[in-house]
Image (cartoon, grey):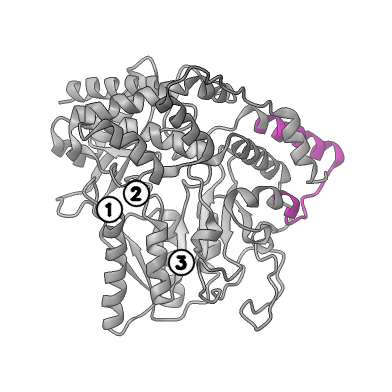
Amino acid sequence: MNDTNIADNAAMLAEPLPSLNTAGWGAKRRDFLRMLGHGAGAAALSPLLFACGGSNSQTRAQDLRAQLVQDEAFWTEVQKLFVLNPAKTFMNIGTAGSMPKLALDVFDVENRKKAAESSSGYSNLLDLRRQVAPGFGVDAEELAFSANTSSGMCHAILGIPWQAGDVVVTTNHEHGGGDTPLNIARDRYGIEISRIAMPVGNNQTAATYQNLFDERVRTLKTQGKRVRAMMWSSPTYKTGTLLPIAELMEVVKAHQLISIVDGAHLPGMMALDYGALGMDFMSGAGHKWQCGPGSTGILIMRNKIRASNPLPLPSWYPVHTSAYTPRDRNAPGAAPFDIAASVTQCGSVHTPMFQALVAACAKWDEIGRKKIETYDLALSAYLKERIVERWGIESLYSPKDDPKLVCGLTCFNPFQNKADIMVSAKSASFVTRMQAEYPQGFVIRNVGFEVIGAAAQHYGVRVSTHLWHDANDIDALVDAMWDLSRKMA
């Protein structure tokens, strides 16, 4: 199978979405569609949606709902791309997404071609990576296909030649996908791990987290410690706090550190230019918000010195590969090489998985990654305002008012008796009953995490809102959660 055929396959299988007739729309309505179409992101979403609604949460929610409904015809067509079971409402994309029909078709066609021709997969998939890389703001040699986020984090962390006494600054809200290779590096190489206790809720700003990391690094250096790297999640899978990459990269550059981002939820949800952000490593999932097959991931590896990050490239060696050529990336006059090939190529790769991932990515590029991001953020903002209406602002673990910290994940305490959130079994029961007892069959999840000053872990309820949801789904979800919270009081 020739990998270059994937673009033709995707184009053949994907029908363009219909354009909307905006004749007769008011100026505010057209402004919202213009924002969706031309890319605003979180920073532009906030003033348009929140400033026009005043400070009252109910007013904000009304404005958000009105604007979501105004573009509902477009997103109704998008929803038709998927084969989701109509008996359930899937709001746990943070754990697993769903392949659109066109990706399923590519997966099926390419699997059958592979079987018919007894094809191997000895390839670094460069043709496929070239198709995907522009959507993420990097060159093909900087974008690797991994097995998933955890695999990418292992590649990134365990490929660094650590020395005993190196310190990595991170948080106490990290996923095991990042914590596990950090712990291996601790036990194998003698590194130290310094964890920042994460504040939660809406009383945080981007500066809060930037200062926390900067102060920790400065304190460690004052103690004579050799701080080598920062690792953080954007967003955290526990509370849905989008730790501000640009601001944390300022700390990285000021202290000349290696930057490692667990971006499991970024691909397919947020439209980020990774070249412009400049992190050394970003590991994301292909199967969550990007809606590719399972066992696919995207690992961004900085391989160029850009204005966004003028620091020398970190020393790094592949740990799971069949393609290795020793090189000094920082040697004078050294030309960039395909560092991502060493992650992508390890024996015979099952190419249909990544061909289907590329088809999903192509559809996202066609719709517009900024358009998807803005819709996801509008859904998330609407959900948060509805939660605040019912449960109060103090129930939120996720921030809502600093646009640099928001994403498509929402985590909160749904219980009338607030202390019940520290009872794991009760939180788990809430999640189970939301699917079993309501006709919409809501699929959500809970997650445990530390809260500063709390006597025990909190087990917050987490909801993911994505491009197959609409305002009606959120209304029904909030009503059901409120009903169940009163039953469980």
User: Which quadrant of the structure image shows residue 353?
Assistant: top right
Which stretch is magenta? Answer: 103-128
Which structural element holds mark 1? loop
Foreground: disc 2 or disc 3: 2
Q: Is residue 73 visible?
A: yes
Dot 3 crowding, Cα within 10 Å, few <14, some 14–19, many 20+: many
Q: Amino acid at mark 3?
A: Ser
Neighbour tally class for label 2: few under 14, some 14-19, many 20 plus, Cα within 10 Å:
many
Inter-mark Cα distance, 1 to 2: 7 Å
> In the figure, is residue 312 to the left or right of 229?
right
Amino acid carrying label 2: it is Leu
Task: First in sequence, mark 1 or 3: give its number.
Answer: 1
- What residue did someone put label 2 on? 405
Q: Which residue is mark 3?
A: 259
Judging from the image, what secondary structure is the residue with disc 2 in? helix
- Taking the magenta stretch, the answer to whether it contains residue 163 is no
Name the one closer to the observer, 489 or 481: 481
